[in-house]
């Protein structure tokens, strides 16, 4: 079957895009591998009306509501490649393929975490990147920022609103001058001894000199990596953000390639569920308009 649009990535951004197109009675195929970025966390916060809901519950609700529309099909699995064909694109799904006039990429990002023993296992439970998402639940307990980029200073400046903050410079970035003065004004403590590992049921930092520091939570600045190679395979233009490259789009979420749109974390310098939903909504509307008025 030929679809009006194939949406690759059926999480918050892709589901929102699909909803607009389904409500316009367009033929929609959603392809999803089921690996949402926030699958490591037990609750999603900060998205109004759904604050504190488990991420999988929110996604399942969106999927059920989308699939109630008669023009929507769901393919569980990975889109392997997207190739241009006459008047549209072919999406390779392994054994089979699907054709669509437009493509929406909503494949999200992967978090490149600092390679510190014990950190990855605590990702989303005691180690976070976004204080708006998980800071409140730390109950104003002591928090640590482990530097993995110069953005650590920005993060450390924010965090005292959530709890007493220590910046572990970890040999990555030692603030000086104005930065140092600003951190001092915010009451941020500095620790230059490298972090050897994370331990404990909660989170305990073990420093290279053997000291142990118990914290309510740890924050890092993950490197932003595309969760899927499709955007590179299609030769889309990228833009550099503070934590890595993301797919370049215009205000209507159109990429550098005609007929290909991108939304959510993969097409923003930084993301959240709310931003992904807004982005997906725009991509859905833009694709619908492009099907009527042309590109
Ligand atoms: C630990 C953690 C906790 C977070 N907590 C919060 C929070 O509390 N509140 C909040 O607002 N935000 C939170 N976020 C951020 C939030 O997870 C993202 O902003 C949001 O998931 C982005 O939505 P998205 O639809 O763009 O991408 P994602 O949710 O990452 O979904 C991308 C989808 O595309 C699929 N996919 C990828 N490649 C392919 C392919 N080739 N073929 C088929 N499918 C593919 C994936 O499997 C996945 O299902 C958190 C992030 C992390 C890491």
Image (cartoon, grey):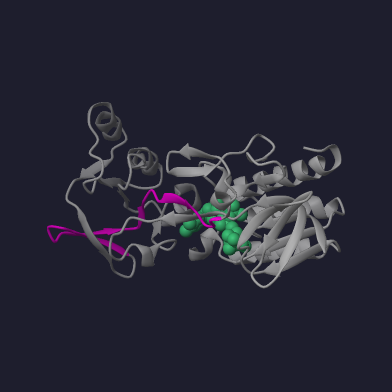
Of residues 58 and 263, the one drawn nearer to the viewer in this rendering: 263
Q: Single out the residue that lies furthest toward the bottom.
A: 95
Which residue shows up at 52% across the image and 44% down it?
A: 246
Q: Residue furthest top?
A: 178
In the image, 16 versus 137, the foreground residue is 16
- Height in image: 231 above or below 53? above
- Name the foreground residue: 266 vs 51: 266
Q: Is residue 233 left or right of residue 19?
A: left
Residue 23 lies in magenta, yes or no?
no
Return the x and y of residue 138 as percentages of the image width and height: 41, 56
**Residue 37 drawn at (x, y percent):** 52, 59
Q: Quadrant of residue 3?
A: bottom right
Q: Residue, x 31% and y 46% (percent of image)?
A: 165
Horizontal side, residue 199 vs residue 292: left or right: left
The quarter of the rendering in which ligand 1 is drawn is bottom right
- Residue depicted at x 24% and y 62%: 197
Q: Where is residue 44 shown, x and y percent of the image?
A: 55, 58
User: Looking at the image, can residue 45 be seen?
Assistant: no
Q: Residue at x 67, y 40 (%)?
A: 254
* Magenta segment: 203-229
Q: Is residue 169 left or right of residue 277?
A: left
Determine the image quadrant of residue 19: bottom right
Q: Is residue 211 magenta?
A: yes
For the C terminus, the quadrant is top right
Q: Which corner quadrant holds the N terminus?
A: bottom right
Residue 224 at least partly seen: yes
What is the x, y in percent for residue 180? 25, 32
Above or below, comparing residue 270 to residue 196 in the picture: above
């Amino acid at each position: 079957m030929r679809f009006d649009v194939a949406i690759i990535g059926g999480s918050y951004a892709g589901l929102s895009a699909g909803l607009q197109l389904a409500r316009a009675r367009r033929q929609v195929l959603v392809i999803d591998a089921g690996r949402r970025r926030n699958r490591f966390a037990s609750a999603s916060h900060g998205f109004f009306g759904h604050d504190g809901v488990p991420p999988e519950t929110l996604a399942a609700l969106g999927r059920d509501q989308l699939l109630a529309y008669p023009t929507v099909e769901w393919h569980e699995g990975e889109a392997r490649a997207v190739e241009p064909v006459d008047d549209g694109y072919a999406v390779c799904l392994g054994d089979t393929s699907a054709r669509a006039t437009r493509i929406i990429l909503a494949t999200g990002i992967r978090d490149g975490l600092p390679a510190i023993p014990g950190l990855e296992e605590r990702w989303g439970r005691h180690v976070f990147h976004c204080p708006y998402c998980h800071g409140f639940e730390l109950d104003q307990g002591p928090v640590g920022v482990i530097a993995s980029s110069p953005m650590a200073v920005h993060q450390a400046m924010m965090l005292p609103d959530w709890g007493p903050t220590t910046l572990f410079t970890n040999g990555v970035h030692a603030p000086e001058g104005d930065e140092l003065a600003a951190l001092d004004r915010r009451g941020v403590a500095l620790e230059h001894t490298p972090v050897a590992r994370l331990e404990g049921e909660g989170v305990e930092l073990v420093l290279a000199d053997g000291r142990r520091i118990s914290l309510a939570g740890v924050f890092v600045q993950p490197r932003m990596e595309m969760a899927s190679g499709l955007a590179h395979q299609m030769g889309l233009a990228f833009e550099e953000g503070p934590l890595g490259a993301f797919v370049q789009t215009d205000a209507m979420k159109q990429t550098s390639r005609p007929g290909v749109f991108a939304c959510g974390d993969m097409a923003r310098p930084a993301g959240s569920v709310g931003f992904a939903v807004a982005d997906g909504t725009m991509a859905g509307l833009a694709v619908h308009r492009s099907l009527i008025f042309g590109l």
